[in-house]
Image: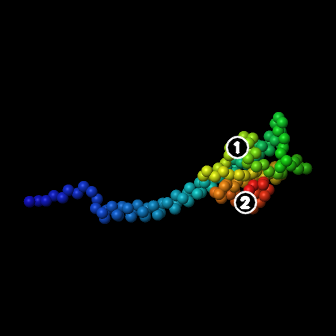
Amino acid sequence: MKVTVNKLGFTLTEVLAVIALIGVLMLLIVPNLTSVFGKSEKNAMKVQESELKEAGLLYLEDYCKNPLGNNTCPGTIKRNSDLTYSGYINLSALVTNDYIEPISLRGSNCNGCVIYENNKAAAYLVCENGEYETESDVDYKTKCSIN
């Protein structure tokens, strides 16, 4: 008489081998994914800085260079003798005047400013909980009164 064995499942060894293989793959993939996500967040914030700079330049045009309606140049921006402008405008003023939407990163609100030097602009951002801060040699926190 011949006995037939009906094998309907996997052996313990096969299951453990698959789990070990998945573990090794995770060890290789997860660090690379976190690196990619970290770079993408940094790139997104660089784009936000660029948007902030453009909003600041539009604000300078509308409030200082060619004021629209009753717009007046704020006291933080001065007209130089060579007809250029220097000073700063905070992100909050740009948001209040609908030049840009509030900026946040992973739920943390960001603060920032645009600094003008002889009609050239540079944007700076700092987010709560140290989530992001513009890398710069400029002491923009002091210049823009950012805490």
Give the SS element for disc 2: loop
Question: Which amino acid type is marked by label 1?
Answer: Ile
Q: Nearer the viewer, residue 98 or 40?
A: 98
Compared across the picture, whether 67 is left or right of 51 comes to right
To which residue does mark 2 refer?
A: 136
Query: Where does label 1 land, which residue?
Result: 100
If you read the primary sequence from the N terminus, does the residue marked by circle 2 or circle 1 appear first?
1
Horizontal side, residue 92 vs residue 45: left or right: right
Q: Is residue 32 above or below residue 116?
A: below
- Between 120 and 99, which is closer to the camera in this rendering? 99
Above-or-below relation of 24 to 61 = below
Q: CA distance from mark 2 to mark 1?
A: 22 Å
Residue at 83% across, 51% down: 86
**Split into 4 quadrants, where in the image is the N terminus?**
bottom left
Q: How is the image coloured?
A: rainbow
Position of the C terminus by quadrant: bottom right
Give the number of the disc on residue 58.
Answer: none
Q: Position of residue 87 (x, y in %)?
A: 82, 51
The residue at 76%/57% (across/down) is 141
| Residue 144, x across and y down, in percent | 78, 54
109 or 143: nearer the viewer: 109
- Position in image of residue 50 (x %, y %): 70, 49
Crowd rating for badge 2 (residues with CA inside 10 Å; few <14, some 14–19, many 20+): few
Query: Furthest residue to the top?
Result: 69
